[in-house]
Image (tube, rainbow, N blue to C red):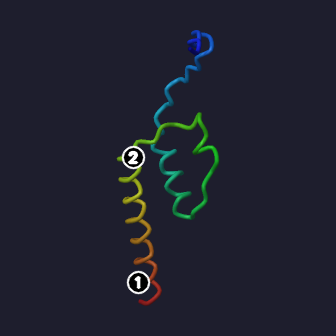
Amino acid sequence: MTPSPSDSELEVRPEPKKATLLQLARIVASGFVMIGRGRDYEPGAPAIDPVRLIILAFAGTALLIGALVLLVTFITA
């Protein structure tokens, strides 16, 4: 029978704080250019809400496509 760990041996991790909108925007922008930053994946990194991340990714994609369409329209006009 294995001894049960005492309270001092148990590692208690604090709950990670939620990512701010600016942090999510930076994560999405680094994803667009395929540059992953190590601090986004470290154990102390803020928690990312998947719904907010997906919404921000769609908004960023729409802005990127809109900017490209505007650029092409401006160049060909």
Give the quadrant of the N terminus: top right
Q: Are marks 1 and 2 in contact (CB under 8 Å)?
A: no
Residue at (51, 30) in percent of width and height: 16
Estimate the spatial distance between the alpha carbons at disc 1 and disc 2, rounded to whole Å: 34 Å
Reading the image, the residue beneath label 1 is 73
Considering the numbered disc 1 on the image, is that residue within a helix, a strand or a loop? helix
Residue 3 position within the rendered picture, expressed as x and y whole percent measured from the top left: 59, 12
Residue found at x 53% / y 59%? 31
In the image, is 33 to the left or to the right of 21? right
Residue 9 on image: x %, y %: 62, 14
In the rendered image, the residue lying farthest to the bottom is 76
Amino acid carrying label 2: it is: Pro
Image x and y of residue 49, in percent: 40, 42
Residue 26's spot in the image, x, y percent? 53, 51
Disc tally is 2
Position of 15 relative to 71 (above/below): above
Kindly identify which residue carries mark 2: 50
Q: Give the residue type at disc 1.
A: Thr
Work out whether mark 1 precedes mark 2 in sequence or the reverse, and give the earlier one. Answer: 2
Report whether 4 appears left or right of 72.
Answer: right
- Residue at figure coordinates x 35%, y 53% from the top left: 55
